[in-house]
Image: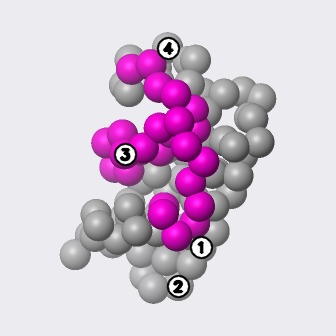
Amino acid sequence: MKNMITIDIIGVKPPCPRCKRTEENAQKVAERLAQKGVKITVTKLDATAKETTEKYGVVATPAIAIDRVLKIMGKELGARVIERLILKEL
């Protein structure tokens, strides 16, 4: 079982309300799963940055990638959805 996960939240800068809520939800899940011994790093990436587009292509925001694999884009994600995506990776 993996005990370390990387989450990239891809959005615009400054963040739109949907991107901000998605990032907040990811942080909540990271804190909750940390209590169970799962280390999660949440990183905010700018969807318009060259490095981001080279890594993930052009994406609809907000988007979420887990362990560098793009999972969902163009939807605000609640904490339960993010947690389910992470648990599938463990």
Q: Seen from this angle, which residue lies furthest front?
A: 75
> Viewed as shown, does residue 79 lie left or right of 38?
right
**What element does badge 1 sit on?**
helix
The answer to which of marks 4 and 2 sits earlier in the sequence is: 2
Numbered label attached to residue 31: 1
**What element does badge 3 sit on?**
strand
Q: What amino acid is found at the position of numbered circle 3 in the picture?
A: Lys
Q: What residue did someone put label 4 on?
A: 50
**What element does badge 2 sit on?**
loop
Circle 2/circle 1 CB separation < 8 Å: yes
Q: Which residues are magenta?
A: 57-82
Residue 42: x and y in percent read: 54, 53
Circle 3/circle 4 CB separation < 8 Å: no
Q: What amino acid is found at the position of numbered circle 2 in the picture?
A: Gln
The answer to which of marks 4 and 1 sits earlier in the sequence is: 1
The span from disc 4 to disc 2 (Cα, nearest Å) is 35 Å
Q: What residue did someone put label 3 on?
A: 71
User: Going 52% across and 70% down the picture, which residue do you hit?
Assistant: 80
Neighbours of disc 2 within 10 Å: few (<14), some (14-19), many (20+): few
Residue 8: x and y in percent read: 49, 44
User: As displayed, is residue 7 above or below residue 14?
Assistant: below
Numbered label attached to residue 35: 2
The span from disc 2 to disc 3 (Cα, nearest Å) is 24 Å
Instruction: Choose mark 3 or mark 1, whichever is in front.
Output: 3
Q: Seen from this angle, which residue lies furthest bottom?
A: 36
User: Going 38% across and 27% down the picture, which residue do you hit?
Assistant: 56
